[in-house]
Amino acid sequence: MCGRFSLSTPAEILAGLFQADVGALGELAPRYNIAPGTWVVTVRPAGPAGGREAALARWGLVPAWAKDSEIGSRMINARGETVAEKPAFRAAFRQRRCIVPADGFYEWRSEGGVKQPYHFRARDGRALGLAGLWERWRSAGGELLETCAIVTTEANEIVRPVHPRMPVVLSPSDYGAWLGSGGEGAPAPATLLVPCPAEQLVGYRVDRRVNSPRADDPALAEPID
């Protein structure tokens, strides 16, 4: 699964990496311990005019048919193997795929009876593009809420010793295909839901303060040994 991640890359750099209009984001505060239920950056098609836009969505997907938004707390991840079939995700998978930028993501394993977090990031230091889904939900009172989920897959060789699953890390060359703008001959979105090559990532133990969603400072993403 993917239960926490970090993003401190400035909006103007994200604009270049993801070829997206980031004007709606304003100034992004660095975040080193992004937790479910909070607002996260997503990149998605801009609409009929084409191009891509960056928008904020609450992490925890709420299907359009949900009676209330509380279901989102259980919908932070979508398994790539079943995303096209699950009622909560299949409509978004067909029509509302997005990319979730992240400097890195956290996974945990038990060490000495405690949960030890690890941080995984790109070896070249660039922001990762995680495969995501987004949805638009309207309450009975007319409130409009946009939410998202991160798609997961089996872990690759570098993540597997820590956790059996990981987020789908898209190759930049596949961003268009995932967002539905890859053109003729682009790979089908379902074929992209595989682990990224292990050599693209580095991973290391980090401070257990990550376990608290209230902690948020640069030291959380730094190796402790």
Image (tube, grey):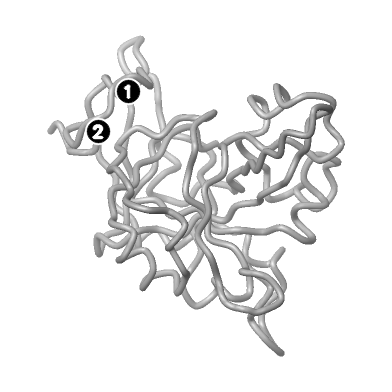
* Residue 94 image offset from top left, x and y in percent: 79, 60
The residue lying furthest to the bottom in this view is 184
> Which of the labelled discs sits on residue 92, or is there none?
none
Q: Residue furthest top?
A: 113
- Identified by mark 2, the residue type is Arg
Q: Residue at x 36, y 73 (%)?
A: 16
> Residue at the location (57% across, 37% down)?
58
Q: Name the residue beneath numbered marker 1.
A: 116
Farthest left residue?
Answer: 225
Pointer 2 local density, CA inside 10 Å: few below 14, some 14–19, many at least 20: many
Label 1: state its secondary structure.
strand
Point 22% across, 25% down: residue: 207
Instruction: Describe residue 214's horizontal placement relative to residue 38 as left or right.
Output: left
Q: Quadrant of residue 160?
A: top left
Please tell me whether residue 203 is drawn above or below residue 180 in the rendered image: above
Task: Tell me the distance, in whole angstroms, between the alpha carbons under discs 1 and 2.
Answer: 7 Å
Are the residues at dot 1 and dot 2 in contact (C-beta closer than 8 Å)?
yes
Of the pair 136 and 180, the residue shown nearer to us: 136
Q: Is residue 19 left or right of residue 137?
A: left
Q: Return the residue at label 2.
A: 205
Q: Position of residue 202 (x, y in %)?
A: 28, 51
- Quadrant of image for the C terminus: top left
On the picture, is 68 further left or further right than 125? right
Q: Is residue 51 above or below residue 161?
A: below
- From the viewer's perspective, is residue 64 above or below residue 202? above
Secondary element at tag 2: strand
